Image (tube, rainbow, N blue to C red):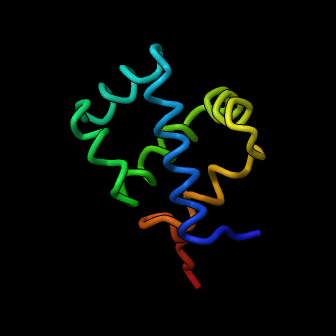
Amino acid sequence: MSMGRESAEVVGLRALAWMAGNEELLPVFLGATGANEADVRSGATDPAFLGALLDFVMMDDQWVTAFCDAQGLAYDAPMRARAALPGGEQTHWT
């Protein structure tokens, strides 16, 4: 089941809020991406940034589970949201 762009951005914003409140994972995200706190704040209005944040969260099943459990989301919500945001389109090779 696909997700609309607006709903995907809401999931991305929820992931951003969850990440900002995670004292252990936020520094890992900042270190891995080279982003700083100002970038994170301005990223809240950038669908491409939200997509990249979801990419990061989806790197680890435990992060996906923790995020979805904290937000009351289905475990496939980050993946569906990512697909609806810029850069999340599936490549069709045929």
> Is 54 situated above or below 81?
above
Q: Position of residue 40 (x, y in %)?
A: 31, 38
Determine the residue positioned at 52% across, 70% down. Answer: 89
- Which of 88/7 is in front? 7
**Residue 2 location (% of width, % of height):** 70, 70
Q: Quadrant of residue 72?
A: top right
Would you place residue 23 above or below residue 70 in this image? above
Examine the rendered structure and indicate whether residue 22 appears above or below residue 71.
above
Quick check: 80 above or below 55? below
Lateral position of residue 62 relative to residue 11, left or right: right
Residue at image coords 60%, 63%? 7
Instruction: Quarter of the image for the C terminus: give it.
Output: bottom right
Q: Quadrant of the N terminus?
A: bottom right
What x and y, as percent, mark residue 51? 45, 54
| Outermost residue to the top | 24
Residue at 53% of width from left, 73% of height from top?
91
Measuring 36% from the left and 20% from the top, which residue is drawn there?
27
Q: Position of residue 13 (x, y in %)?
A: 49, 47
